Image (tube, grey):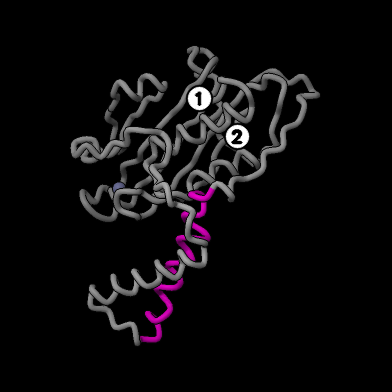
Amino acid sequence: MKQKEILLNSLLKENQISLSGTHADEIGNGHMSTGFDTPLREDAFVLSNEEKIKKIEQHFTEIMQTLGLDLNDDSLKGTPKRVAKMYVNEIFSGLDPANKPDMALFENKYQYDQMLVEKDITFYSNCEHHFVPIFGKAHIAYISKGKVIGLSKLNRIVQYFAKRPQVQERLTVQIAKEFQKILGTEDVAIIMDARHLCVSSRGVQDQNSATVTSFYGGKFSEENTKKEFLKYIEMKTEY
Ligand SMILES: [Zn+2]
């Protein structure tokens, strides 16, 4: 059974986001994010990646030791460094604008004026409240205003913003806004459907709930266009 709760606040409405089924406890605790930019410190990029890895390695060593783990054990010895490298170079690499994928645009030579839908884009992110995985599928659509983008770029932009500590609401809007900017059109829609390990593996331990967030910009806020998009997403892929 999927958890379905409608949670809207005025901020979300302004930005044309609807949410159905999300962490009720987070909203209750005032955990909800208030802005759509990732909150970064002024000095976020003062340290080099190497320096960050060194520092995180030291801190993670302390966390493990505090938990009572013996880092002389062969299996545990390399963990602080592995975690530090994974944070900086992989799962949080999207914090660094230097890692933003290049977006080459093409002329819409085919005069294709219908919506383009890229569905079932798998993504992995991490919840910024617990630092445990969020994973799921993203479905993206846009209607070209003269420019088109390589399909793999849709994927890459999703991965870029996913590789940050995130809340799903912000992730959805960051991706949508980025595509609107790149493509020079408001006509962008996104649905993200994800599981949060902070809900399934701890806390309320609900194994079955999924969180759905959506963004409908421009023409996608019209009922027919929205319906068409939803129909394509539901369409079974039989190949
Ligand atoms: Zn969480």
Q: Amino acid at mark 2?
A: Glu
Of callouts 2 and 1, the N-terminal one: 2
How many badges with numbers are in the image? 2
Quadrant location, the C terminus: top right
Expressed as whole percent of the image width and height from the top left, the position of residue 6 reads: 28, 26
- Magenta part, dominant SS: helix
User: On the image, numbered disc 2 is attached to which residue?
Assistant: 118
Hey, which residue is sitting farthest right in the picture? 109
Image point (53%, 16%), residue name = 218
User: On the image, numbered disc 1 is attached to which residue?
Assistant: 230
Expressed as whole percent of the image width and height from the top left, the position of residue 27 reads: 23, 35
Q: Residues within 10 Å of mark 2 (few under 14, many from 20)?
A: some
Which mark is nearer the camera, 2 or 1? 2
Relative to 10, say whether 67 is above or below: below
Image point (33%, 24%), residue name = 11
Name the quadrant containing residue 149. Answer: top right
Expressed as whole percent of the image width and height from the top left, the position of residue 85 reads: 48, 66
Name the quadrant containing residue 29. Answer: top left
Left or right of residue 30: residue 45: right
The Cα atoms of the two marked residues, 2 and 1, are separated by 12 Å
Q: Nearer the viewer, residue 151 or 185?
A: 185
Image point (44%, 39%), residue name = 171
Q: Nearer the viewer, residue 127 or 204?
A: 127
Tell me where the magenta segment starts and ends, as one range: 73-96
Q: Is residue 74 magenta?
A: yes
Q: Is residue 114 magenta?
A: no
Q: Amino acid at mark 1?
A: Leu
Name the secondary structure under disc 1.
Answer: helix
Expressed as whole percent of the image width and height from the top left, the position of residue 132 reads: 35, 55
Image point (23%, 78%), residue name = 68
Q: Nearer the viewer, residue 3 or 202?
A: 202
Quadrant location, the N terminus: top left
